[in-house]
Amino acid sequence: MKTPREILLEQHRSAAPKLDAIRREVMKVAADVNRRKQPVRELTFAAALANAIRLSFLELIWPCRRIWTGLAAVWILIFIFNFSQRDPSELTARKTPPPSPEMILTFRQQEKLLAELIGPNEPQAAAPPKPFLPQPRSEGRIEAWMT
């Protein structure tokens, strides 16, 4: 007695070669279409660089565009705050006229008075440093014990 599976396989056994032929034809057409879709072309340096920049933008910046926009806004606010906090006295200090001769004379008198109060500015002779003579560690210990 034959099983239902064996009965079905016998009925469709004659269709197997026809199905294989159709399968080969479809695969051949699919291979031709794939070859036509992917033309062989050489990319120039500029095209490769543009492609790399585009891919970097799409992978790094575009997914996080809200975060990047927020960071840009924060930097703009910091720049505006920094610019608004400039000290106007710097500009006025640059515009002030040079000191008058009386002021220069007064500064020199103050310098003389300060020099008289402090005393002469002579360099003091420093004692020459002791020469370092390395000794074995065992001798150093003996001297430390004897003192």
Image (tube, helix red, strand yellow):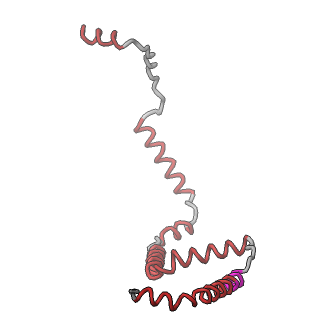
Is 108 in front, or is 42? 42
Q: Is residue 124 above or below residue 42?
A: above
How many marks on residues? 0
Whether residue 49 appears in magenta in the rendering, the answer is no
| Residue 59 image point, x, y percent | 52, 76
| Residue 23 image point, x, y percent | 61, 86
Q: Is residue 80 visible?
A: no
Residue stretch rendered in magenta on the structure: 32-38
State the residue at coordinates (43%, 34%): 119
State the residue at coordinates (48%, 30%): 122
| Residue 55 image point, x, y percent | 58, 76
Is 112 in front, or is 49? 49
Is 66 in front, or is 101? 66
Q: Looking at the figure, which quarter contains the N terminus? A: bottom left
Q: Is residue 8 left or right of residue 56?
A: left
Q: Is residue 96 above or below residue 101?
A: below
Q: Is residue 10 left or right of residue 50?
A: left
Q: Is residue 107 visible?
A: yes
Q: Looking at the figure, which quarter contains the C terminus? A: top left
Instruction: Characterize the magenta stretch by its predominant secondary structure.
Output: helix
State the residue at coordinates (44%, 73%): 85
Q: Is residue 109 above or below residue 59?
A: above
Whether residue 35 appears in magenta in the rendering, the answer is yes
